[in-house]
Image (cartoon, rainbow, N blue to C red):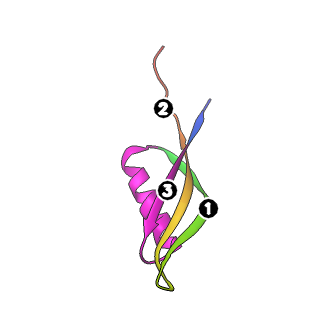
Amino acid sequence: MAIASVSTITAASEKSWQDAIQCGFERASKTLRQITGLQVLEEKARVEDGKITEFLVTLQVIFILEETDG
């Protein structure tokens, strides 16, 4: 039986929301194993002087918990 867990993270990019999602996924992949999916919960942007300066996303990263002995 597989048990999944969810970790919520926030990622940022100066390029786009898509790039922020990719950056968040790549970073999560360095510490979480067996990622099976992502859900974008929120997209935001920072604005300075009438221009978007940063794209922010909040993600839920879904991954399978590893089996333990015992």
- Label 1 environment density (alpha carbons within 10 Å; few <14, some 14–19, many ≥20): few
Q: For the view shown, which residue lies furthest in the left direction?
A: 30
Q: CA distance from mark 2 to mark 3?
A: 24 Å
Q: CA distance from mark 1 to mark 2?
A: 28 Å
Amino acid found under the numbered disc labelled 3 = Thr
Check the image and report above or below for 6 versus 59. Answer: above
Range of residues picked out in magenta: 7-33
Check the image and report above or below for 3 versus 17. Answer: above
Badge number at residue 66: 2
The residue at which mark 1 appears reads as 42
Check the image and report above or below for 7 versus 53. Answer: above
Picture coordinates of residue 41 (x, y %)? Answer: 63, 58
Amino acid found under the numbered disc labelled 1 = Glu
Q: Earlier in the sequence, mark 1 or mark 2?
A: 1
**Which of the image's four quarters has the N terminus?**
top right
Between marks 1 and 2 in the image, the one whose residue lies nearer the viewer: 1
Q: Earlier in the sequence, mark 2 or mark 3?
A: 3
User: Which residue: 58% across, 53% down?
Assistant: 37
Badge number at residue 10: 3
